[in-house]
Image (cartoon, helix red, strand yellow):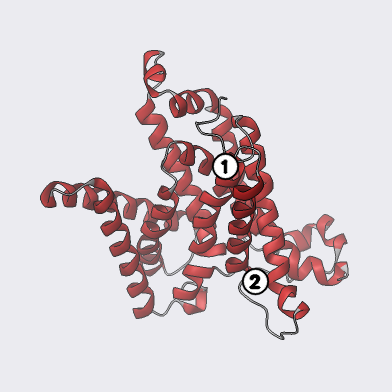
Amino acid sequence: MSGAEFVPLSLTPLLIGVFAAIACALPGNFLLLRRQALIGDAISHVVLPGIVVAFLLTGAVSAWPMMLGAAGASLIAVGMIEAIRRLGKIEPGAAMGVTFTAMFAAGVLLLEQTDTSSVHLDVEHALYGNLESLIWLDAIGWESLTDPVALAGLPEELPRIFLTLLGVAAFIWLFWRPLKISTFDPSFAQAVGVSTGVIGLALVVVAAVAAVAAFDAVGSIIVIAMFICPPAAARLMTNRLEVQIAWSVVFAALSAVLGYVLAGYGPIWVGSNHAVSAAGMIATISGLILAVAAMFAPCRTRSGAPVG
């Protein structure tokens, strides 16, 4: 494929997929080590009704209303979980499962009953995103990368997810020590003055921001897969936290690139005329990478958390 074809049609969706995958994988490492990996799954379910309600109130798909809607939905979810746990006297995991399932179903029903398809906000896009449609119409080739007029026409999802990735990386860099200590030894962290509750809440908030930013472009399937699969595969590669994070970034980027390419060209290579969902293929590749790591990674037979 020449630059005149690749840059307008594939460069921006490919970059968006890579940035979204890494933005979710970075906090996913700490959620995994804290045995909270399914929080990423939970977030992707909870934010859907909040995003839909934000669209219905504003009439537009924009970042801040979506963030506020997702935050409101998260607060409602916390209240529902606590009410179900107290009134029903059931364990927290069951209360979480009921709440997240009910809220995701409510979001799907809202999507089905409202006309949101014109802005790429419907049931299909909630699951698969609209990655393939995020093309750069103003680009004519590689020279467009230095053309201010062409750059002004970039899909807004690209700078949004890139800034989100920078924010996630900055959070991990700035709070590396308290994150690391509170993850591996919460008692020691409290003894040295680290507020483990605040750090844990901040981590969940950062994960939620990454999920919301990625949701519109890549859908819930990639968000769930990237929170879990790259960090889990990276955990099997090393017992060093820094190296694990590096491996998770590599696996997330590799999943996005291979998944996007195979979604478009894989069916052609086997004689089919139709491409498949890029989101579904990216999630599938991330699962295959985890499976390979589970069979061949050097730390697959070791137990215990990374030693730092």
Specify whether residue 56 is in view. Answer: yes
Q: Position of residue 121 (x, y in %)?
A: 47, 72
Quadrant of image for the C terminus: top right
**Residue 44 sits above or below residue 125 on the image:** above
Residue drawn at x 41%, y 50% is 38
Q: Dot 1: what SS?
A: helix
Q: Is residue 24 above or below residue 183?
A: below
In the image, residue 265 lies at what x, y percent? 75, 74
Please identify the quarter of the rendering in which residue 183 is found. Answer: top left
Q: In the current view of this chain or complex, which residue is farthest to the left?
A: 87
Badge 2, how many Cα within 10 Å: few under 14, some, many 20+? many
According to the picture, the residue beneath numbered tag 1 turns out to be: 26
Residue type at the position of mark 1: Leu
The quadrant of the picture occupied by the N terminus is bottom right
Instruction: Please tell me the numbered disc located at residue 243.
Output: none
**Cα gap from disc 2 to disc 1, whole angstroms:** 24 Å
CB within 8 Å, label 2 to label 1? no
Q: How busy is the neighbourhood of tag 1: few (under 14 within 10 Å), some, or many (20 plus)? A: many
Residue 308 falls left or right of residue 115: right
Q: Secondary structure under badge 2? A: helix
Task: Please name the residue that numbered disc 2 is placed on.
Answer: 132
Image spot of residue 39 (x, y percent): 40, 48
Foreground label between 2 and 1: 1
The amino acid on which the numbered mark 2 sits, given as a three-letter code, is Glu
Q: In the image shown, does 130 or 153 lie closer to the viewer?
A: 130
Total labels drawn = 2
Q: Is residue 112 left or right of residue 207?
A: left
Residue at 59% x, 31% y: name it. 241
**Which of pointers 2 and 1 lies earlier in the amino acid sequence?**
1
